Amino acid sequence: MNGPLRITKSGTVHVGVVGESGLDERRVALVPKIIPALVKQGVEVVVEAGAGLGALIPDEAYTEAGATLGDPWSADVVVKVAPPNDAEIAKLSSGQTLIGFLAPRNADNKIGALKSAGVQAFAVEAIPRISRAQVMDALSSQANVAGYKAVLLAASESTRFFPMLTTAAGTVKPATVLVLGVGVAGLQALATAKRLGGRTTGYDVRPEVADQVRSVGAQWLDLGIDAAGEGGYARELTDEEKAAQQQALENAIKGFDVVVTTALVPGRPAPRLVTAAAVEGMKPGSVIVDLAGETGGNCELTEPGKTVVRHGVTIASPLNLPATMPEHASELYSKNIAALLELMLKDGALAPDFEDQVLADSCVTREVEA
């Protein structure tokens, strides 16, 4: 690394809020309502002009909240949403701190480039899922948005009603909805589908989440497979377990009108849960929404980022659904970032304590002071 990290001992900590450059990324790392609390802690917030426009936040809202407009890339701490690209990393200098989604488990991550640039980086997706870190859990806050929007997308693409309707022309049965993978996104999808009137069922390879599925009014699909792993994630299944799971799921999926898939294994391609044969067996007009498209998809016929029709079944694989609801997604993410910043600040100075599990686990590049 090129120099000492900018761990402030006195003076004012500057936090820079940058505009996101990614295609269709409309979120912003901090919203105005968060800024007064940071200012009270002695933080000066510098916002790039236009940074909040994608989330419909004008520059004036930031200045009224106590921020200033300027160059955020020279701040002590730079906060953003999406992983930085090469051009953005080039704007950073040795000793700065970067906070955001950094995709540390992805093969094409920029962790090496950040380390070479001398940047201390904290990946929000690496924050441990422990009780006291829930307020900082950006993965969960954004997964809630994705699970909600996935069901709205499914309802929009469906050729059938979600709720049961009784009319003079007859009674329409409620849609049957299966959610595969019931982490935060899956549970939100089940709850949203239930609110829309669907008859909901959840499945996960971790049987201990069955009670959570039932808590949102859904039934539990028991296939007799246990793949509970560490850190609240599912472990990868053995080949024999995969074969048994696929056959059982294939038979079950054919009876549902809507299937929402959310199954992910960190650092690995998404598990294939919905086979081509299962899609072919579904009734024409059925819908699959695959939230695992960024890592290949849970459905064999998924085309990431596209909506296609195969065997009369609509298969949608939207990328970055939280960015389609930038107002609330940004608000939730801002609270995550503010809580993480608060953990790093001591008496108005930036002094992260790496004895703290949250900071130690989430820091993906670090210079040890002599």
Image (cartoon, rainbow, N blue to C red):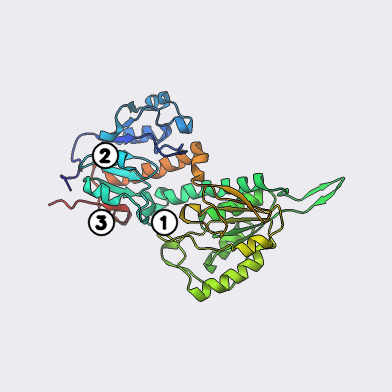
* Amino acid bearing label 1: Ser
Residue positioned 44% across, 51% down in the render: 139
In terms of depth relative to the viewer, which is nearer, 178 or 108? Answer: 108
| Residues under numbered marks 3 and 2 in contact, where contact means CB atoms less than 8 Å apart | no
Q: Is residue 177 above or below residue 325?
A: below
Q: CA distance from mark 3 to mark 2?
A: 30 Å
Q: Residue furthest bottom?
A: 240
Precedes in sequence: disc 2 or disc 1 = 2
Q: Nearer the viewer, mark 2 or mark 1?
A: 2
* Amino acid bearing label 2: Ala
Position in image of residue 221 (x %, y %): 62, 66
Residue positioned 34% across, 28% down in the render: 67
Residue linked to disc 3? 355
Q: Can the viewer see residue 313 in this picture?
A: yes
Precedes in sequence: disc 3 or disc 2 = 2
Residue linked to disc 1? 131
Q: Secondary structure at mark 2?
A: loop
Q: Residues within 10 Å of mark 3 (few under 14, many from 20)?
A: few
Q: CA distance from mark 1 to mark 3?
A: 17 Å
Position in image of residue 15 (x %, y %): 30, 36
